[in-house]
Amino acid sequence: MHEKGLSKIPIPKNPNHVIYAYYHNNQISKIENLEHLYNITHLHLQWNKITKMEGLDSLHCLKKLYLGNNRISVVENLEGLKYLEELHIEKQNLECPDALCFDPRTLIYIGASLRILNVSENKISDMTWVKPLRQLEVLVAKKNMLHDYEAVADNLCTLTSLVDINFLGNPMNRKHRYKETIIARCSQLRVLDTIVIHNTSKTFIRNFDKVVRLRQLHEKNKIESTPKGVDEFFDLNMLPGPRTHSALSMSDLSTQKPKITGIDSTYTFMPRAFWRTRASPPPRKVVGPPPLEPPPLPKQPFPENGIQPIKGILKKPMPMKFI
């Protein structure tokens, strides 16, 4: 039924037998008369005058939907398409300055099955909407208005199945380190802008980007001994705010340069002047260990009768304190 000059979709005679439906290159302005096409898997509606996505709830077996070159402004009403794998919705509203919008509920529902998405030439300026598409493998977003490649990389890094991306014709393609950032953040990526990524280059770029980010984080977390540095210190360690003011007021009492000291997990602030006036604790008395064996007995005088006592038999009993 393509290129027939149709203004609306006709009702087929045997709707249960239809699997592939071709209605492209017509004058259709509304999606209707599709509620009886239960077994349809491919629907071609590109190059028409459709303004709203509707009438698709009953197409439970639909796998591929083609809606390119129409006048659609919002991607919506796809909650019934639980087997949808491909969505081609490029070149919408070419005369309108507004970008194509995406309904979050629709993206969450089709995110479990959608593998291929084409949103080229839709004046898209950010990619935050792509996060629910967790099974997406191929993303085509050519000739849009994407400028911030770092934000785009952060939004795409959560899609663990994404292997092919095409951003040709966007302003961010001409910026420095665009490809390196996209490749480093999306570790599973294999093809970028129709160019295959080799494993050696991917490993090198990923390690290089990790070093650069660690260096930037180190520069960002440098703390100075100033009121601003104290605020940064508490912001970094997520400590409550009143301690900052108490630390600053204590440091103002001293004429010396304030010092910040951290002891274990409790942070204490005290200038050097307070430590100088602090009395040192008295020395602790060292107590020796108890005796391990009794001291030797004094020598007994030689008896008058001249008989020496037998060894092993004591003349006097041993004191109890040594037993």
Image: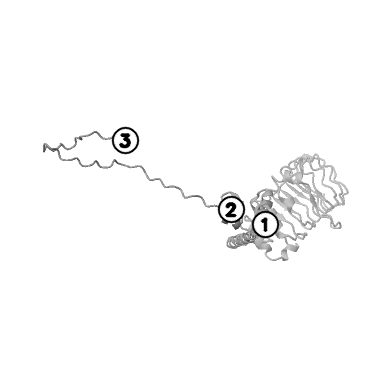
Residue type highlighted by circle 2: Gly
Q: Residue at x 28, y 35 (%)?
A: 319
Q: How far apart are labels 1 and 2 at the CA level?
A: 19 Å
Residue type highlighted by circle 3: Lys
- Report the disc number at residue 321: 3
Of the numbered discs 3 and 1, the one sitting upstream in the chain is 1
Q: How far apart are labels 3 and 2 at the CA level?
A: 52 Å
The picture places residue 168, in percent across and down from the top left corner, at 73, 62
Q: Is residue 60 above or below residue 28?
A: above
Q: In this view of the protein, which residue sits in the foreground, 164 or 29?
A: 164
Crowd rating for badge 3 (residues with CA inside 10 Å; few <14, some 14–19, many 20+): few
Q: How far apart are labels 3 and 1 at the CA level?
A: 63 Å
Q: Disc 2 marks which residue? A: 262
- Report the disc number at residue 252: 1
The picture places residue 88, in percent across and down from the top left corner, at 76, 52
In which quadrant will I find the C terminus? top left
Res. 157 in view:
no
